[in-house]
Amino acid sequence: MSSEPLPDQTPPLRAWRSAVKLDLAPLRASADFRKLYLGQFVSGFGSAISYVVLPWQMYQLTGSSLSVGLLGIAEFLPMFILAFVGGALADFVDRRRLIVITELGLAGCCALLVLNSLQAAPQVWVLFVVAALFAGLNALHRPALEALTPRLVPPDQMAAVSALSTFRYSFSYIIGPALAGVLAATFGAAAAFSIDLATYLVAICTVLLIRSVPGPTQSDRLSFRSIVDGLRYARSRPEIMGTYIIDIIAMFFGMPIALFPALAASFGGASVGLLYSTLAVGPLLVSLTSAWTKRVHRHGLAITISVVIWGLAIVGFGLAPQLWLALAFLMVAGAADCASGLFRMTMWNETIPDRLRGRLAGIEMISYLSGPYLGNAESGLVAAWAGLRFSVVSGGVLTLVGTAVMVALLPQFLRYDGREGLKRKLAEDEVPG
């Protein structure tokens, strides 16, 4: 008897395997993208540490979830203002140079946190100031990074780029927070912030190895008019506006991270890093099996389903009586948020013309950071008024209600087909500004 596999069984098996793996094609295709990805992978790991240690230190100094939530207000204002500026700059100046300059500033912020943590009595106001500086510099950094990436990778590989970016984020935010808790408890906050500082220096070196990438040939100078042009383009695309609005809804109402220090204590003193890490486990699993996303073209529908699952999982997290069950719901929530992010990034990178990519990246940044920043304050205020559990559960319920309203008002979002969006981008890139 022949040992060869049956011909009608092998292709489906191979197709299944190819559909559930992480697509590494962008890393193979572009040496510059590999360098950029490596540097951001390293700096993302350091940022994940500070992401946990900064609110942890605030809670240690104040004992208040409201104070932790108010960090979001300090971060929101500079982010909101400078994201428009950063987006317009990314469409005009050398994007690589802008990334280097802002990462130098971010490294300086880490140095300030180290110095403050080494004091006998670290100052709370320094944490608020540095959080604001971090947010402002990131608002200049992120649009340049997002606008540079499509210049390094072919348009048809943007879905794979989104998956790789999500893998980078989720891996960093599993290992980073877990390590952050140990570092902060054993060696203090200064040691944790020092690691973040070192990772930014590594990232700067890798970006300097990338070839210079000037702005688009039909770029506009930084001006109020150029910013308004970006806003007008966004408004002309209801499916793009849908990606912004639905994420703001999910993150404003449903993001409970400001409550993690207090929730960890409510579960018998569990490590706060465990909650942060578990939220990133789901995204890691989704990104590792993300090749299937290339076969999904109804991106708006996929995002909507993902946000509904996120809202339901947050409700479950808030109602969970035991730590293991709460962590399971967090894992599901993280996976759903990851799927939403994958399709949102794919829509943005596949459909927005290069001459507007920086400005739209600035608007994107406002959409996906406004929710968490303001949501931190919202969850802290509700928790102070009605308790931790009520804050989490009500946030999940309001996410579901807000999503239903948004979909009813923007039916074009549900009908969006990625194949048509990609054709539109190719056509728009051929037309001068």
Image: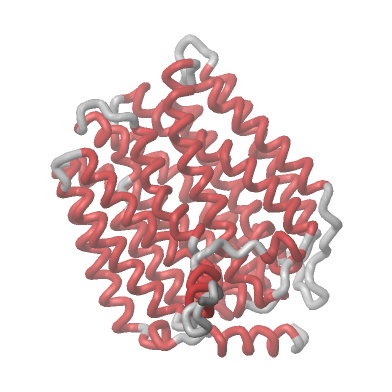
Q: Name the one closer to the observer, 332 or 57.
A: 332
The residue depicted at 25 percent of the width and 57 percent of the height is: 313
**Identity of the residue furthest to the top in this view:** 120
Q: Is residue 89 among the parts visible in the rendering?
A: no
In the picture, measured across the screen, residue 39 lies left or right of residue 351, that is right
Query: With 198 as the anchor, is 318 left or right in this view?
Result: left
Colour scheme shown = secondary structure
Q: Percent from the top left, x then y, of residue 177?
A: 45, 36
> Relative to 97, is 59 above or below?
above
Residue at (33, 29) in percent of width and height? 271
The quadrant of the rendering that contains the C terminus is bottom right
Exactly how many numbered labels are in the figure? Answer: 0
Seen at 69% across and 47% down, the residue is: 38
List x then y, in percent, for residue 263.
Answer: 25, 36
The answer to whether residue 222 is visible is yes
Q: Residue furthest right?
A: 211
